[in-house]
Amino acid sequence: MNTLQNPVRRDLIVGLWLGCALLVPAAPGATTKVIVEGEANGPFVQQIVQSSANVPATAAISTNGAGTVYGGWKDATGAAMASAEVGHLRLHASAAASAQMTFPILSVIGSSAEGRAQAFWNDNFTVNAGTSLAGQAGQITVTLVIDGALSVSGDYRTPSTSAQFQMDARLTDSAGGTTVLASGGTRVYIDYGGQVKAQPVSGALLGPGVLQRTVPVHFGRPLAVSFWADATDYAPASAGAVTDGIVTAEASSDFSQSVIWAGITDVRLADGTPVTGASVTSDSGYDYLLGTVTNGPVITRIAVQGQQLALEWTDLGPRSYTLEASGSALGGTWTPAGGIAWPIQAHTVLLPLPTQSSAFFRVKVR
């Protein structure tokens, strides 16, 4: 198997800022949507799920096509999974095909599969910095995380086997300017010589990494958010002779963590002067300032202090935490630990000593 995990530069993605004086009102509300498609030696099967921003849209599909044919057999599987919530898109697609000629015939025995997953989120958010700065031009620094891998396997008998990821993310200021945060993708494929190659898709060569982008804004005015990501896999296999044996092709686009809005790390005036105390409101209620947690909190300390139990976990900034307890790590019921009004903003806590013989803890964050 050939795997490409880091096919792009990890520096800043160049975006576009198109400014004009026309005020463009943001569309109210926020939505999420996913589309999954699968094909395996037969017609495409598609599923579309659209939801409000507060309910993630999720879908999964798997198609299979196998059986004997004149002169041999063929098998194929195309699958896809997608999940969309504000701040986080997840994608996974795979395709596998195989064929064998068991006795000579004049034609070729062909098998093919395809899996495709798409995820979308649209929203509006506003950066607020007090009445004195309302309407003034400023800038924010946005961080995105792309996490995933592309892989293909096959040989010269399975040309065009491919795994592909692409995305488009942009913010549109109500003043009419659009900043492209990221647009492009990567296709990994097997060429007619049996070699694995990579090429850009619909723009820049884009894949796993951390992207930062400076975005012009107007304080107190909404920005429209538009995110889309796609994973598409295709696997063809053809057996033209008994001596070919079993011909197999596989492709996988594993972006199950995919595209993550990791927060706004800096707020400034247009001249570069730092702005403190900024806040963000959004139609969805999502906190674009804090973003989505990319690595969850880890409990770093548990100690008995008199008749209390002290716990500490990694500090993820100004977030809300709930410590949950269970009598079993596997299959137990998790409930908020007693003695505290949850959630809390601190990353340390003192609890009454557990009365049960064993206790397990985990931290939930939002």
Image: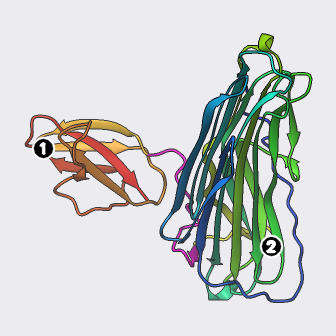
State whether residue 8 appears in this view. no
**Quadrant of residue 92 within the rendered picture:** top right
Position of residue 182 relative to residue 172, above or below, is: above
**Quadrant of residue 249 within the rendered picture:** top right
- Local secondary structure at mark 2: loop
Extent of the magenta region? 278-296
Tell me the kind of residue under disc 2: Ala
**Residue positioned 70% across, 46% down in the render:** 210
Q: Label 1 crowding class (10 Å Cα cut-off): few <14, some 14-19, many 20+? A: some
> Which numbered disc, 2 or 1, marks the residue that appears first in the sequence?
2
Q: Is residue 66 left or right of residue 195?
A: left
Between residues 155 and 164, which one lies in front from this camera angle? 155
Q: Label 2 crowding class (10 Å Cα cut-off): few <14, some 14-19, many 20+? A: some
The quadrant the N terminus occupies is top right
Q: Is residue 149 left or right of residue 361?
A: right
Position of residue 125 relative to residue 60, above or below, is: below
**Residue positioned 63% across, 79% down in the render:** 129
Q: Based on the picture, tell me whether residue 281 belongs to the magenta stretch.
A: yes
State whether residue 84 appears in this view. yes
**Residue positioned 32% across, 44% down in the render:** 362
Tell me the kind of residue under disc 1: Leu
Q: Which residue is the site of mark 1?
A: 353
Q: Which residue is the site of mark 2?
A: 270
Between residues 135 and 201, which one lies in front from this camera angle? 201
Where residue 237 appears, as percent x and y from the top left, is 76, 29
**Residue positioned 22% across, 48% down in the render:** 333
Where residue 130 appears, as percent x and y from the top left, is 61, 83
Q: Main secondary structure of the magenta part?
A: loop
Position of residue 53 relative to residue 243, above or below, is: below
| View extreme (right): residue | 193
